[in-house]
Image (spheres, rainbow, N blue to C red):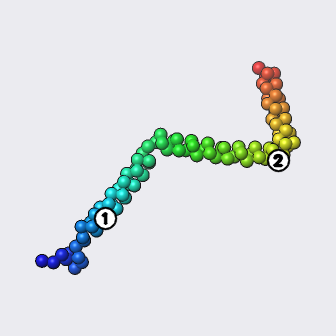
Amino acid sequence: MTNATPDGSKDPTKEELENDMAATRERLSENIEALEDKLNVPKQAKTKVNDAKEQVGAKAKVVTEQLKAYPRAAMAVGGTLVALVLLIAARRGRST
């Protein structure tokens, strides 16, 4: 009796079968983890919040560096914003 399959190839060895099963288990584990991540809505929300925090932090750093580089412009913008807020508050006070 030979160890040939119907298509003429040799039967896999025990070691080959074990390696194939280990690789299959690894792929299955990765697929299960991917499904778990997709179905875990709270985890997805936390990830998105953390990503947004990182983006805001990076943008704040850039703005801070720009304000340090141009302090007069920063004061002018700040003064304009304060004046705008006071103007809006004064108009609301008159209209009520």
Residue that mark 1 sits on: 19
Q: Residue furthest bottom?
A: 8
Q: In percent of the image, x 35 and y 56: which residue is there?
A: 28
Residue that mark 2 sits on: 69
Label 2: element kind: helix
Q: Nearer the viewer, residue 74 or 89?
A: 74
Amino acid type for the residue under numbered disc 1: Asn
Q: Residue furthest top?
A: 96
Q: Could you tell me if the residues under marks 1 and 2 are in contact, i.e. CB atoms within 8 Å?
A: no
For label 2, the crowd category at 10 Å Cα-Cα, with few meaning under 14, some 14 to 19 and many 20 or more, is few
Q: In percent of the image, x 71 and y 43: which residue is there?
A: 60
Q: In percent of the image, x 33 and y 57: which residue is there?
A: 25
Mark 1 vs mark 2, CA separation in Å: 61 Å
Of the image marks 1 and 2, the number of the one nearer the N terminus: 1
Q: Where, by quadrant of the figure, is residue 74 drawn?
A: top right
Amino acid type for the residue under numbered disc 2: Ala
Which mark is on residue 91?
none
Q: Where, by quadrant of the figure, is residue 83 drawn?
A: top right
**Eyeballing the image, is 1 above or below 18?**
below
Picture quarter with the N terminus: bottom left
> In screen coordinates, is 3 left or right of 84?
left
Examine the rendering and report whether any part of residue 91 can be seen: no
For label 1, the crowd category at 10 Å Cα-Cα, with few meaning under 14, some 14 to 19 and many 20 or more, is few
Picture quarter with the C terminus: top right
